[in-house]
Amino acid sequence: QVHLVESGGGLVQAGGSLRLSCATSGITFSSYAMGWFRQAPGKEREFVAAIKWRSGGTIHADSVEGRFTISRDNTKNTVSLQMNVLKPEDTAVYYCAARSGGLSSLVVYYDYWGQGTQVTVSS
């Protein structure tokens, strides 16, 4: 059974930082591309960042480029999202997702999802 479990969310002031982590089990982690998505109240789930399973190549949404960094540790089966210079508009539930394939920013291409972790940025 596949499990993705996010952690590290919380309340932070604008300009602050948080680091999200996603622990995985039940999949051959090193064979999956991993992604982070977020969903704010009343909005659709949107892409944040993704990382390849082998080369570690990454893509980031324009809205977070230069502020957020995705990384992975194939020895620990974890993927992280370092979030710096947080803004109130970053407030959302953040989800970790796994895809058996290459990088993608599309929600529909991801096979497994975590339950999400809340990130709230106060102004």
Image (tube, helix red, strand yellow):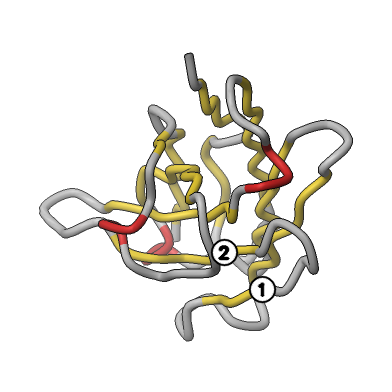
- Classify residue 46 by image quadrant: bottom left
Amino acid type indicated by mark 1: Thr
Is residue 123 rendered to the left or right of residue 16?
left
Quadrant in the rendering for residue 45: bottom left
Q: Residue furthest top?
A: 1
Q: Residue at point 67% right, 82% down? A: 66
Q: Residue at left 50%, top 45%? A: 98
The residue indicated by pointer 1 is 58
Q: Give me the residue at 88% from left, 36% from top.
A: 75
Residue of label 2: 50
Question: Residue at coordinates 63% horizontally, 28% vertically from top-left?
Answer: 24
x then y, percent, for residue 94: 43, 45
Image quadrant holding the C terminus, namely bottom left
Q: Position of residue 33 (x, y in %)?
A: 59, 55
Compute the Cα span from label 2 to label 1: 6 Å
* Of 3 and 70, the residue lying toward us: 3
Please provide percent x and percent y for residue 18: 67, 48
Judged from the image, the secondary structure of the residue bearing numbered disc 1 is strand
Q: Answer whether labels 2 and 1 touch (C-beta < 8 Å).
A: yes
